[in-house]
Amino acid sequence: MASGIQIDLGGNQTVTIGEGDEAAGSSFAISALGSSELTVDGVDTRVDGIASVTAGSSATFNAINGGNLLIDQGIGKLGVLNSMKFGVGDNSGITFDAGALSVGNMLSSYEVEFSGDGTGSFTFEKPTVSLLDNYTFNVKGMQEGDQLNLGGGDWSLDEGFLGWQDAYRDGQLNLVQGNDLIGGKVVARVDMTEEQYQEFLKDPDAYLSGGKFTYPVCFAAGTMISTPDGEAAVETLSIGDLVMTASGKQVPVKWIGRQTIRRLAAAGNYSPVRIREGALAAGIPNQDLVLTASHGVILDDLVINAGALINHDTIDYVPGSELPDAVTYYHIETDNHEVILANGTEAETYVDYVDRQAFDNYAEYVALYGIETRVVEMPRHRISSRRLLPLALRERLGIEDVMSVAKTA
């Protein structure tokens, strides 16, 4: 139901909805849409109507800093746009619901760009009835934990005229689902080098799960996890084993997600972060800790994604030249979202912003539990971007202020 709130995005404007704004936590209608940019900053909101659209204009919708935007308008009026872009920032999500019916949609191409060190998600819900429609999404900037969910169907290679060899063309991997006669066809174009495409062909499941792209959030093999009997390497743990929480509680392992990524991919979108011994505090970690950039460690009672802590000295990405032929990541799931000790460092267990289907052994989870169960995130503030780190923490860890560096330059 419409809230009565109206926002004018006609012409060429930049509008931000943040904490304290009338539309925050509510819904609103767009009275006019032109070549404007709407940013949802740290709040949840919904577009439930667009009165008019300027033909040939270019609209941009962003969600940043934990914001979530649902565009529940349908695709009909938006078809007269020249272009439509979606920007997904740290810990944020955008859902574009194309509505019930679409016939011959004129706006066939969309841009989706992920940014920041934290996780994000973009979802496109196809029209319930769609005739003679194509939807092409050009996607850039995905990192560990980011999710792309387009159309709700299974992907296949868009093979073109030459078979599977033609699925990689013009520097992009081309994926497709559905058809343009009935139900609508969705195409995803993902920037890749030719070498990365060859790695993709060796293990497509490492990148794809049904209609989703999901990047994993995990510990690297060799990480030592605290247990009642001392430290144990993460890869030696089994379901039912007890691990210690930071508060001294013993909790059983419910499941361990596992994914192996080849070196070329690991040196790109899956780049691991190495936190050197003693980088966080005296003796923390107690030895170098390697984990994915979106895995949260706990500092000053905050959950902070490892990628946000990079200081290019004691905390940095592992160079590709140092990686083995394949990198195996592990993620420990317990009944609740817990804080455990990894190489003496407080770190999080599995939480639901990562899709279990991204792991190699997902079938094991289904065999054990039958259905997906939700793990609710612990009540701590999560920081997924360097610019959101408290000043005292940045100074303590030697993390340069990005804005200060830019001003100096």
Image (spheres, rainbow, N blue to C red):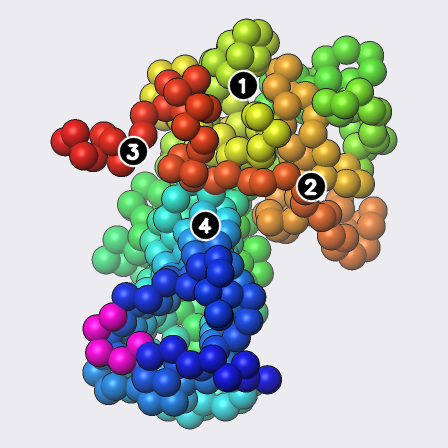
**Amino acid at circle 1:** Leu
**Residue located beneath label 4 in the image:** 65
Asked if one can make out residue 131 in the rendered structure from this viewpoint, the answer is: yes
Could you tell me how far apart the alpha carbons at marks 3 and 2 are, in whole angstroms? 29 Å
Residue 125 seen in the figure: no
Give the mark nearer the N terminus: 1 vs 2: 1
333 in the magenta segment: no
Q: Which residues are magenta?
A: 9-13
Farthest residue in the left direction? 409
Dot 1 corresponds to which residue?
Answer: 289
> Is residue 17 rendered to the left or right of residue 153?
left
Which residue: 77% across, 11% down? 230
What element does badge 4 sit on? loop
Q: Gap between marks 3 and 1, in whole Å?
A: 24 Å
**Which residue is tagged 3?**
402
Of the numbered discs 1 and 4, the one sitting upstream in the chain is 4
Residue 216 picture quarter: top right
The quarter of the rendered structure image containing the N terminus is: bottom right
Which residue is rendered at x = 60% and y = 47% of the image? 354
Foreground: 250 or 47?
47
